[in-house]
Every structure is written in C-alpha cells, then in structure tokens.
Amino acid sequence: MCVLFTAQLPRIPSWMFGNQFAGCPACGSGDRLPLPAPAEQRALLSDGAIIATTLSKISCMRCGVVTYSEPPSANVVSGWYGSHYTLNAFAPDADRFALARAANYAKWLSNQWGARPPPASVFEIGCGNATLLSKLRELWPSTRFSGIEAAPAAAAQARAAGFEVVTGHFPKVIPLATAVDLVVSVNVIEHVSDPVKFLLGVSQLVGREGVGFIVCPDGDRPNIDLLFADHLYSLTAAAFSHFARYARLCVHAVVEAPAEIGMFVLHILEPLTEKTAFVCDSDNASSLVLHGARVRLIEQWRQLDRKLAARLDSAIEVTAFGVGEAAAMLRAYAPLTWSMVKRCTADVVVREHFGDLPVLGYGLLRETPKGVMLLAVQPATQSRLASQLEADGWTVVTWADLVGLADTPHQKDGA
Ligand SMILES: [Zn+2]
C-alpha cells in the first residue's frame, strides 16, 4: 500500500552504523524470517558460475526486503567479479538475444521518459559493452551518452562503439563533474553491498533536476532472483523507497516491466524535496504472504532435480536446448538431471562450450533428431518451444509446471 507522509529530509538511521544487520537494513525491523537454501553447498552466480556456498537469506516481515542473514565479506564478493566474470563480455553483436533484449529495454525506458523532449545527457551505471546505450542512441540521436562499467573488456568494447565509458566500480568512481538529465541502471543495485551508497551516487549524478531510472528484479513477487548468490538484495518497492530516502531521493513511480522483459521493475527516482511525497510502504500481513510464496518457490527448486531426473527416465541421449540463464540454473540446482545431458544446442551458437558440454547449432541437429530434448529455457517459453521441437521429431521434456508456472508437462510425469 502507499501512504502519504511529509517528506522531511532524512538522516541515515542508527541501525545502519555498527552492527547494521541487527535489524533490517531498509526499514530497521527486527522481525525477519529465514528462507530455505535452494541447495546445500551449491549456489549460482549471475554469469553461470557455481560456488560452494549454502545460501542463507532472510525476509523482512515489515518491508519485505531479502538480504543475506550474514552478508558475504567484501573479499568474497570481489572474488565473484574477477576477470573470469563473463556476463557482459560477449561482443555486442554476437548474441542476437542480447540485442533484442536491449531493444526491448530501450523501448520500455524511452516510453517511460514520455513525451518530454529527449534527455540531453544519459549516464548508465554498469553499461556493459554499451548494448543498451547503442539502442537508446538509435532512439535519441542527439543525446550525449556516457557510462561506467567494472569489467575492463566490456568497457573497452563500449568505448570502441563510440561511448564515453570509464572502467571502474560505481560509486567509488563517479566520473562526471556535472549532473545529467537521466541516470540509467539495469540490474546492478541488487548486486551492491550498500544500496544507500549506490543511491547517494545516483543522487549526485542527477543533481537537482535529473531523473534516475533504476531497474531491478521485482522483489514484490516471488522471483527466481532469490536463487542467485550475487543478488545481495531482493528489493521490494517499500524497501527501495526507504533506501532512496536515505539517499535524498524520492521514488516517483514503480513500473512493472513488459512481459517480454520478465519479472523486473523500474523505480523512477527524483531528488527529494521538502514537498509532500508518496512512499510505498508494506505491512506484516502482506510481507508474511510474500515470504510464504518465496519459501514455496525455493522448495520447488529444491525438489526440481529429483522430479526432473525421474521425468527423463534414464534416457541416455539427452540434448539440452538453451545456453542462457535457465540452463545455468538447471546446471546449478538440478545436477543429477544435468549429468544426463550429453550436449547443448541453441539457434545461435555464441560459445562452443557450456560448462563441460559442447554446444551445437540447432541447424545441425534438426535434420536428424535423435533422443530426448530437455528444455533449458525460461519456463514461460517452454510450451511454445516444445511444440516446435516435437514437430521436428524430438521427445521433449519440460519442467515449467515443477516450478509453479502455468504450463503443461510434455512428458509422462514420473514425479
Ligand atoms: Zn525491512
């Protein structure tokens, strides 16, 4: 629910000093409940790497934010993002799915900018190889674009594409001396150890009149982002509005992403003023319901391996379709199932291997379909893809129904 309050310029509260994890870092509540781990001594990073950690996260029963029960040390976190971290290091035109995704984001974000004249300046935090900036430049050709990216290879690609991009960690590095009209950040804030510091950096960049567009996974719905070890926060609108206020920003609106982008939200931020403002708040009852739904989602992922392996029914010639996020999630959290996979395939091959498995273009396999095809794509798209592959002669195994999404199994359920 949203409540009205008179916006006094906030101070960062006392629980954020000293032992900040004595209470919720967003709202300060001590009323928090633990979430189950999706696996023992096994957890997934966003680039697909698997680490030997048992996730230990907790939900706040007031604002709904999910954090680690004990946050990983700075050394551990920096180890996740070393030179081997590959999420943004593909060549910009190597993956047409990445380009299509960036085009969807550019369209969505520019629509949210509305009928105003295009921004004169845009700065992206965590711009990767500038795929999104490139798409925004097509829509706003007169705008000046710049950004910051921590991964040196991706930042170099962005500069080669003609953008003013600094290599560095935001907000330790804030390369601009003057404010910009629009600060964009897509799926970065959930990775940072201190969202308030991050938003203070955003506040500095937007100055007195700019706008911040901060996209992150939607923490107000039970979301697979809970399964990623490097997502240090799952942010609800209520939690986000608390963090924003400590950074002297106001959440002007929260907008759900269109279906083709997925379960993400855009927080539109403006500088906090003395004027009256809205803040999203939550209550214990709705946070308890959300917590219950999160527990069910994680439990479904805990059960997925056993049920899906049974569904494969000891097939010996299993091919997995997909080399993206869903494939990485199966590899991490359904290891018995994944051990039955002999090779991966995809419409477009952007890497020759996925983990230890070879990746073959689907065009090579299509003429001689053989055996079982395990779908390793997002649950929402499994039904449509299954129909196409079955028409090509494959025995297709899906699992959307095993993680609670409306879909129907394409194999006799051995679970
Ligand atoms: Zn809280």
Image (cartoon, grey):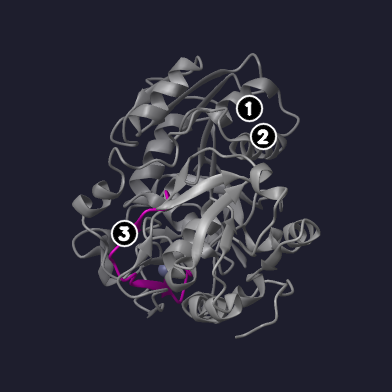
Q: Does residue 71 belong to the magenta stretch?
A: no
N-term-proximal mark, 2 vs 3: 3
> Is the residue marked by circle 1 packed among few (<14), some (14-19), or many (20+) residues within 10 Å?
some
Amino acid on which the number 3 mark rests in the picture = Pro
Instruction: Determine the residue located farthest toward the bottom in the rendered image.
Output: 415
The quarter of the displayed image where residue 263 is located: bottom right
The residue wearing badge 1 is 135
Q: Are marks 1 and 2 in contact (CB under 8 Å)?
A: yes
Location of residue 367 with respect to 34 vertically, above or below: above
Q: Secondary structure at mark 2?
A: helix
**Where does the N terminus fall, quadrant-wise?**
bottom right
> Is the residue marked by circle 2 packed among few (<14), some (14-19), or many (20+) residues within 10 Å?
many
Q: Residue at x 64, y 54 (%)?
A: 262
x then y, percent, for residue 35: 41, 77
Location of residue 267 with respect to 61 vertically, above or below: above
N-term-proximal mark, 1 vs 2: 2
x then y, percent, for residue 69: 30, 71
Q: Is mark 2 within 8 Å of ligand 1?
A: no
The residue wearing badge 2 is 103
The residue wearing badge 3 is 13
Q: Does residue 50 belong to the magenta stretch?
A: yes
Residue 247 visible to an observer of this rendering: yes
Amino acid on which the number 2 mark rests in the picture = Ala
Q: Secondary structure at mark 1?
A: helix
Q: In terms of depth relative to the viewer, which is nearer, 194 or 339? A: 339
Q: Residue at x 71, y 75 (%)?
A: 409
Marks 3/1: CA distance? 40 Å
Q: Secondary structure at mark 3?
A: loop
